[in-house]
Amino acid sequence: MILCLLFFSAISFSQKKLRLVDDKATKETKALFDNLALLSEDHILFGHQHATEYGHGWYGDPGRSDVKSVTGSHPAVIGVDFSGLSGRPDSLIEKEKASLRKTIADTYDRGGVTTVAWHFNNPVSKTNFYWNDSTAAPAVKNIIPGGSHHDKYKTILQTIAGLIRSIKGEDGKLVPLIFRPYHEFDGDWFWWGKAHCTTDEFRTLWRFTVSYLKDSLGVHNLIYAFSPDNRFATEQQYLERYPGDEWVDMLGVDNYGDFGRDGSYDIEAGIKKLKIVSDYALRTGKLAAFTETGLESIPKENWWTEILLKSLRSEKMRLCYVLVWRNDVRSPTHFYAPFPGQLSEADFKKFYNDPYTLFENDLNNIYKTKK
């Protein structure tokens, strides 16, 4: 019993000593970071990509989300994307900035959390964020320091930084964001993927991006999240392209494959991977999260409670949030959260009502330091 108490005391002490990679992080960013760590001891926040921007059959309706239509609450974590901030006419970039600024500020003012993905077009070739063997050009080696397109990349980051520094809530404070660049880098489908750059090139890209944003551009309201896809089975494999503890605040994993994609399930493997992430985060003073998952069309009626919830609650992991992907406006099948009348609606309500899961209405002063 004494050993167990000492063990749990050591974990609690470790959690209190969490430290962001940006030692100039704003007070609200530090509070969010610390509160996510505290909440992860007994709960997990539920997130949904683009939840309040659009949903199944609708677009731009104020105050709406498919999750809220089912449960009465928005997700605790809202996913947005910085994809529209480069490679487009200035007029469209400014329009995108205004839209993002409102979505993010509104989420903050309601007490919710925003996480940012970054599917941006290849800055070296005239292709989108996906890799195409016939048209895409290697980009990572060309945008890191010394590369032919390094100055262009710096300009892109300056646009990103300008937006981040301009988003304020009704309280006048800068809104903290969980920034998740270059996700699923262990796959080959994006231009920053494993087949298209070396390990050293990827690590250099990550380190330069973090350093340039915080040290040169004065961005101090970001929590930096590292999230490969599920192509690992050991901690060593997970950390293959890891830039180092001094460059990452949150450890994540994107995993659709083990949780039902194409009808295939390997729940044991999925749990093992989540535990690798959670264990390393605990050991190094980082946050951990299930940064992307979901089952397209949700054809399994009890997927939320029997697959996702049971997996999250196993192994005593500490994951601060789980995020499922978007609900497309037009597609009748491309959705990852239920809407009224969808097959899994009743089960999702059980998931919502479970004391382990937190939605936006459950959050209380997440940007305030707890005394």
Image: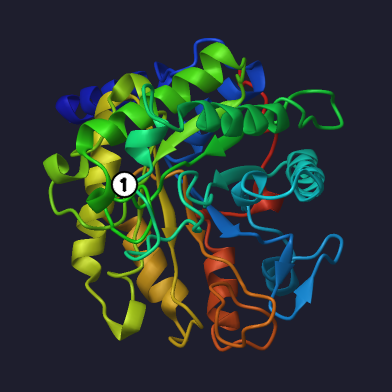
Residue at image coords 32%, 35%:
141
Q: Position of residue 204 (x, y in %)?
A: 32, 27
Q: Horizontal placement of 230 versus 61: left or right? A: left
Q: Horizontal placement of 172 versus 17: left or right? A: right
Q: Secondary structure at mark 1?
A: loop
Is the residue marked by circle 1 packed among few (<14), some (14-19), or many (20+) residues within 10 Å? many
Q: Position of residue 71 (x, y in %)?
A: 69, 69
Picture quarter containing residue 352?
bottom right
Q: Position of residue 367 (x, y in %)?
A: 67, 29
Question: Which is more toward the observer, 71 or 285?
Answer: 285
Q: Position of residue 276 (x, y in %)?
A: 22, 45
Residue underneath mark 1: 317
Residue at image coords 60%, 17%:
217
Kind of residue indicated by mark 1:
Met
Question: Which is more toward the observer, 223 or 347?
Answer: 223
Quadrant that contains the N terminus: top left
The reply to whether residue 315 is in sight is no
